[in-house]
Image (cartoon, helix red, strand yellow):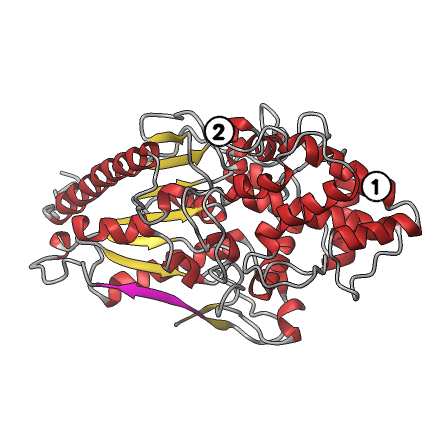
C-alpha cells in the first residue's frame, strides 16, 4: 500500500480534512534485471494501469505481462484504481458521499506518482516504463501516454473504446455495441442461425404477456423467477428484459475460445465461446410462447447461473455480489465524464427500440448520484480522434468484442498503430496464452512485443545519451 493524496489537483485540503488514502499495488520482481552496474542497465518496468475492479483480477489474468517478463527482464507492477478493490479513500457511507474524487484524471495522477516513487525506491529512475491496460484500463494507458509521455514510454491498450464519446468527428454510432453483440449471436459469430431471430421474438413475447396479470404469471413460470421477484407491472417486465439483455452484452465481451472467469470478476467460470453456448437453447427455428421464454431463461442462465446451482432467478441481482459495487461506481463515472451514448433499434440488432436520450440519462444521473453529466468532456480533454501528435501506443481490438465499435481500428501514425484480431473477444491478447487461442491473437502478441522492444530500446538510448552528457559553460561577458 502507498499513501497518496485524495485530491492531487488542489492545494486546499478536502472539506472533511482527510488528505490521503492507501492505494494498493503489487510488485513482482522475479524476472527483473536489478543487479546492474548502472540504472540504464536495469530492466524495464511493466505497469498495469488498473481499471474498474479489484486489482487482483488483472494481476491474475494479464498473461501478456507475465509471459513477457522473462524475455524483457521486467519488473511487474499492478496498480489498483482509486475507489475500487481495497483502494478506497473513505469507508462506509462517507465513500458514497465523497465520490467527486473518482475521476480518470485523479487515477492517472495516482499512477504517475506511484511510478515516480517506485523508481526512486528501487533506484530505477532510468528504467523504461511500458503501460498495459484493457477496456477502461486501456483507455487510461493510452491517455497516460499522451498526458505523461515522460512517465510512460509506451502503452499497450487492449479493447480501449477511446472514441465512444459525444463530439467525435465523424460522430460515434451509439448502436455499434448492440450490432456487434447481435453479430456474435449469428453464424458470422459462430452461433446458431435461429438465435438472433428467436431473441427478437422473445422480447416481443415478454412485452405481450407482460401487459396483464395472467401473462406475467406465465412469464414467472417460464423464466423460473423466484417467489420474491415481484412481477406486477409493465415496468417490472421492462426491468426483467434489461436484466436478460445485459447477459448477452457480457457473453459477447467474454466470447473467449476457452473457459474463463474474467467476465465474472474471477468468481465463477463461463464456458468456451459462451455466446455460442447461450444460443444453443434458442437454436430451433420459430420458437414461440413458453418454449421461447424457457429458451431465453436457459440462454441467460449461461451467465447468471454459471454454477448451474440456482433454483430460481431474481432479476434484481447480478451473477455474483462481488461485482455489484464496481458496477455501481462505474455508473458514477459514466454519469460524470465517461458519458458513452448507447442505443438499440431492434432492426440492426436483436433487441428492441432503445434510443439514446441524453436528457433522460442526465435526469437518471441526477436522481442516483446528484451529478450532471459532462458529455463532451472526454473528447475535449483527450482529443477524440485528433491524436496524431501521440506516439508509442498499440491499440488492439478483437472483432468479437462489441467495444471494438468505438475503438481505434486503423493506424493513426507510424507509432500509434492498430492491431485487429478477427477471432478475439474483449482484450483477448492481454490474457494468458492458451492452446485454444486462434492464430490471430498469437500473432498480435508477437507484434506487440516487437513494439515493446522498439520503445524500450529508444527510451534506454535516450537515457544513456542523457547520462553521457557533461555540463560546460562559455563566457558571454561583454568585451
Q: Is residue 309 left or right of residue 314?
A: left
Provide the major secondary structure of the magenta segment.
Answer: strand
Task: Give coordinates of residue 204: x percent, y percent.
Answer: 80, 36
At 53% from the left and 39% from the top, the residue drawn is 276
Q: Is residue 146 visible?
A: no
Q: Which mark is residue 386?
A: 2
Task: Give coordinates of residue 327: x percent, y percent.
Answer: 60, 57
* Residue 136 sits above or below residue 19 on the image: above
At 79% from the left and 54% from the top, the residue drawn is 221
* Residue 42 sits above or below residue 135 on the image: below
Task: Give coordinates of residue 415: x percent, y percent.
Answer: 32, 30
Foreground residue, 280 or 64? 280
Q: Is residue 30 left or right of residue 355?
A: left
Magenta extent: 23-29
381 in magenta: no
Specify few, some or many for label 1: CA neighbours under 10 Å numbering under 14, 14-19, or 20 or more. some
28 in magenta: yes
Label 1 vs label 2, nearer the camera: 1
- Disc tally is 2
Q: Which mark is residue 207?
A: 1
Foreground residue, 417 or 100? 417
Circles 1 and 2: CB atoms closer than 8 Å = no
Occupied quadrant, residue 100? bottom right
Q: Is residue 157 left or right of residue 231?
A: left
At 66% from the left and 37% from the top, the residue drawn is 341
At 58% from the left and 43% from the top, the residue drawn is 278
Helix or strand or loop: what does disc 1 sit on?
Answer: helix
* Residue 226 sits above or below residue 280 on the image: below
Amino acid at each position: 500500500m502507498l499513501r497518496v493524496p485524495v485530491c492531487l489537483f488542489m492545494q486546499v485540503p478536502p472539506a472533511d480534512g482527510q488528505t490521503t488514502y492507501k492505494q494498493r499495488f503489487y510488485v513482482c520482481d522475479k524476472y527483473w534485471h536489478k543487479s546492474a552496474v548502472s540504472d540504464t542497465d536495469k530492466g524495464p518496468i511493466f505497469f498495469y494501469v488498473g481499471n474498474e475492479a479489484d486489482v487482483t483480477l488483472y494481476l491474475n489474468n494479464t498473461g501478456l505481462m507475465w509471459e513477457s517478463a522473462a524475455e524483457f527482464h521486467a519488473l511487474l507492477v499492478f496498480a489498483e484504481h482509486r475507489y475500487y478493490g481495497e483502494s478506497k479513500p473513505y469507508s462506509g457511507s462517507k465513500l458514497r458521499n465523497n465520490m467527486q474524487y473518482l475521476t480518470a484524471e485523479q487515477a492517472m495522477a495516482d499512477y504517475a506518482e506511484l511510478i515516480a516513487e517506485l523508481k526512486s525506491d528501487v533506484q530505477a529512475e532510468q528504467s523504461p516504463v511500458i503501460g498495459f491496460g484493457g477496456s477502461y484500463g486501456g483507455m487510461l494507458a493510452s491517455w497516460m501516454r499522451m498526458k505523461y509521455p515522460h512517465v510512460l514510454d509506451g502503452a499497450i491498450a487492449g479493447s480501449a473504446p477511446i472514441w465512444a464519446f459525444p463530439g467525435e468527428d465523424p460522430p460515434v454510432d451509439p448502436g455499434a455495441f448492440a450490432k456487434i453483440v447481435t453479430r456474435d449471436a449469428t453464424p458470422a459469430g459462430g452461433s446458431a442461425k435461429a438465435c438472433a431471430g428467436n431473441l427478437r421474438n422473445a422480447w416481443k413475447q415478454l412485452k405481450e404477456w407482460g401487459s396483464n396479470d395472467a401473462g406475467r404469471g406465465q412469464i414467472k413460470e417460464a423464466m423460473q423467477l423466484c417467489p420474491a421477484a415481484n412481477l406486477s407491472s409493465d415496468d417490472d417486465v421492462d426491468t426483467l428484459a434489461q436484466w436478460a439483455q445485459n447477459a448477452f452484452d457480457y457473453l459477447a465481451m467474454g466470447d473467449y475460445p476457452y473457459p474463463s472467469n474474467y467476465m465474472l470478476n474471477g468468481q465463477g467460470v463461463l464456458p468456451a465461446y459462451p455466446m455460442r453456448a447461450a444460443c444453443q437453447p434458442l437454436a430451433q427455428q420459430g420458437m414461440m410462447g413458453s418454449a421461447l421464454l424457457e429458451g431465453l431463461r436457459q440462454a441467460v442462465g449461461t451467465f447468471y447461473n454459471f454454477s448451474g446451482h440456482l433454483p430460481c432467478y431474481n432479476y434484481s441481482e447480478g451473477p455474483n455480489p462481488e461485482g455489484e459495487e464496481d458496477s455501481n461506481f462505474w455508473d458514477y463515472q459514466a454519469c460524470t465524464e465517461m458519458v458513452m451514448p448507447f442505443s438499440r433499434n431492434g432492426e440492426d440488432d436483436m433487441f428492441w427500440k432503445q434510443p439514446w436520450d441524453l436528457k433522460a440519462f442526465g435526469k437518471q444521473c441526477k436522481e442516483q448520484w446528484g451529478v450532471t453529466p459532462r458529455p463532451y468532456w472526454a473528447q475535449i480533454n483527450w482529443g477524440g480522434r485528433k491524436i496524431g501528435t501521440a506516439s508509442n501506443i498499440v491499440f488492439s481490438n478483437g472483432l468479437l468484442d462489441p467495444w471494438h465499435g468505438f475503438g481505434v481500428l486503423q493506424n493513426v501514425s507510424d507509432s500509434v498503430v492498430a492491431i485487429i484480431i478477427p477471432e478475439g473477444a474483449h482484450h483477448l491478447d492481454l490474457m494468458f496464452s492458451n492452446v485454444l487461442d486462434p492464430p490471430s491473437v498469437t500473432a498480435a502478441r508477437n507484434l506487440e512485443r516487437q513494439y515493446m522492444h522498439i520503445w524500450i530500446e529508444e527510451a534506454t538510448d535516450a537515457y544513456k545519451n542523457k547520462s553521457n552528457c557533461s555540463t560546460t559553460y562559455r563566457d558571454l561577458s561583454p568585451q
